[in-house]
Image (cartoon, rainbow, N blue to C red):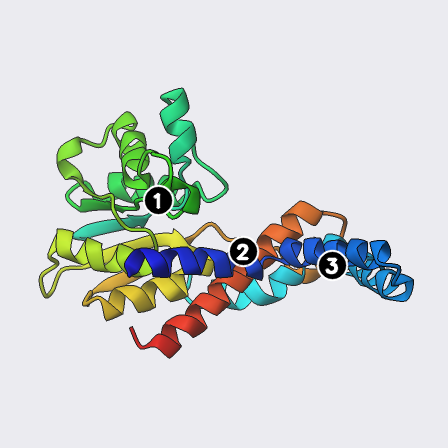
Amino acid sequence: MDTLVFVASKLIALLLRAETWEALLLTGALIALVSGRLRAARRMLSVALASLLALGIFPLGDLLIAPLERTYPANPQLSQVDGIIILGGAEDGVGTARHHQVQLNAAAERVTAGLALAHRFPDARILLSGGSGALRDLARGTMPGAEVMAAAFRETGIPQARLLLETHSRNTTENARFSYNLAHPTPGETWVLVTSAFHMRRAMASFERAGWEEVVPYPVDYRAEGFLDGIGWDLAGHLDTLDLALKEWVGIWAYAASGR
């Protein structure tokens, strides 16, 4: 059942992507053109072109992602820290396995901020949580996210003895639940949660529901640039931010509705 839910969530996420709807519009226009429905073809092509120009010029995703990133303050005050949780998502498991070298992506701040906290609080345990959230990895092997992050931590002098690796989670709910079972946090312990700022709201809800009590959110990897500052042709960047924002908001609503 968990696998079916996982696959379904990935298919839904695909449908939420703006570029998917652009492709559907173009496909519909081509079908209408071939079938001789010229007026319908012109309408769909006009909508596709207008929306593509709007997406390329205006940072519409900033309007959706900025409220998520403002949910928790950056750089919270920390004194006693018993553990640091870093959520996966910054790593390239396939690239790391292929090149035998740590490969990170645009969310690399999850790892770099986690490393900074690990050196700042040398007595804190470090929990690296992440299996693989990629649908294609059901059919082919890849290096779990936690193992990629662990390699990065070891390369910067963090001993293996400090690391707790949770390598089976495929989404945020499993991050929280599996990490709790691995760490067994006791009352009074303070754990710091490191993940992207746009993802922190959903992550905190998942961790609180999984039983974590003293968790301090430490958001990193901010994406919103400000709407006016972001105006200009950047189709790939604007699409990426919009897709992230849509995924998070739908995830928040679905999680709240499910009551899980």
Quadrant housing the N terminus? bottom left
Picture quadrant where residue 24 is located: bottom right
Quick check: 160 left or right of 120? left
Number of the front mark, 2 or 1: 2
Q: Is residue 146 visible?
A: yes
User: Residue beneath label 1, please?
Assistant: 132
To which quarter of the image does residue 2 belong? bottom left
Q: Which residue shows up at 30% across the image and 48% down it?
A: 86
Mark 2 highlights which residue? 14
Q: Amino acid at mark 3?
A: Leu
Task: Tell which circle, 3 or 2, labels the residue nearer the N-terminal end.
Answer: 2
Residue 109 location (% of width, % of height): 43, 43
Horizontally, residue 211 falls left or right of residue 146, namely left
Mark 3 sits on what residue?
25
- The correct choice, above or below, for 42 with respect to 119 in the image is below
Disc 2 from disc 1: Cα separation:
17 Å
**Point 35% across, 58% down: residue:** 4
**Alpha carbons under labels 3 and 2: distance apart:** 15 Å
Asked whether disc 2 touches disc 1, contact meaning CB atoms under 8 Å apart, the reply is: no
Mark 1, Cα crowd under 10 Å, few <14 / some 14-19 / many 20+, is many
Q: Secondary structure at mark 2?
A: helix
Q: Position of residue 256 (x, y in %)?
A: 38, 76
Q: Residue at x 25, y 41 (%)?
A: 118
Q: Amino acid at mark 1?
A: Ser
Residue 231 appears anywhere in the view: no
Task: Give the number of the mark in front: 1 or 3.
Answer: 3
